[in-house]
Amino acid sequence: MPPLLELKNVASYYGSVQALKSVSLRVEQGEVVTLLGANGAGKSTTLRTISGLLRPASGEIWFDGQPIHNMAPEKIVRLGISHVPEGRRIFPGLTVRENIMLGTSNRGSLPKKQMEQEVGEMFEIFPVIKPFENALGWTLSGGQQQMLAVARGLMAKPKLLLLDEPSLGLAPVIVQQLFATIRIIHARGTTILLVEQNANMALSVANRGYVLETGEMKIEGSPKELLGNEEVRAAYLGGHG
């Protein structure tokens, strides 16, 4: 079977600046794959290119057996890719419950009973935000907002969930809670492509990982292989400690 997602020699630009240089990667059905790299390496650009927010200059992107590199973002969402961007982007004038419900916008009008059931499932996965379901989204803490953003992404019923820097700016105890939830999401059957600054945490949940460096794919391997790679350890895992 072909991979669920495959990038073939993808190049992307921001204006005249080349952000991705012939990037190739694959995500198999049922995997968690993590994309590591320093700030500015092209990790977020890779996710934006997959979700159609940035059109690749060259190369191909295939998802679930069909090319998507020339598709509009809304069509890509309908195919089953849900992108939870860096920065959470909670709608401030909406309640927690309303923010979650917005995640179904790619699925047409759902029966009220089904919507209520699915929102209830999100509160089961993210119990920490349940007490705030009628509070405005912007009043939540950073960690709670991140969980809300992921819940909203899951409401699209994605075949592939793109997570961009979910632990950014969060306290260590909240990061632990968040990654425990990512394990639950994966166990429930969602395939995940994870961009994450916290390499140790990312590799703890991943089946495979890639390392991007200034827009180029440098290394691919299992978590064990990447953890044992001296270059990776020095750059992203605090050296030998």
Image (tube, rainbow, N blue to C red):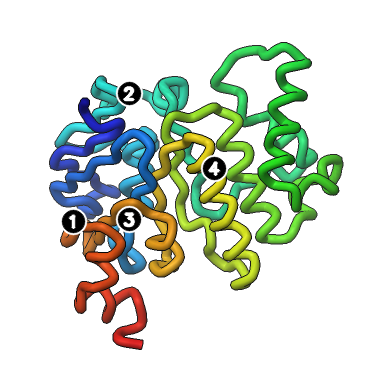
Residue 129, percent across and down? 76, 49
Q: Check if mark 3's residue and mark 2's residue have beta carbons within 8 Å.
A: no
Residue 227, percent across and down? 29, 70
Residue at the spot x=33%, y=74% of the render?
236
Task: Give the class, few, some or many, for how many residues have Cα within 10 Å of label 2's Cα (few <14, many ≥20).
Answer: some
Task: Give the class, few, some or many, for how many residues have Cα within 10 Å of label 1's Cα (few <14, many ≥20).
Answer: many
The mark nearer the N terminus, 3 or 2, is 3
Quarter of image, res 4: top left
Q: Quadrant of the C terminus?
A: bottom left
Amino acid residing under circle 3: Leu
- Depth check, mark 1 against mark 4: the one in front is 4
Amino acid residing under circle 4: Ile
Residue 50, percent across and down? 33, 37
Amino acid residing under circle 2: Met
Residue 224, percent across and down? 28, 65
Label 4 residue SS? helix
Q: Check if mark 1's residue and mark 2's residue have beta carbons within 8 Å.
A: no
Residue at the spot x=48%, y=30% of the render?
158
The mark nearer the N terminus, 1 or 3, is 3
Say whether residue 142 is left or right of residue 71.
right
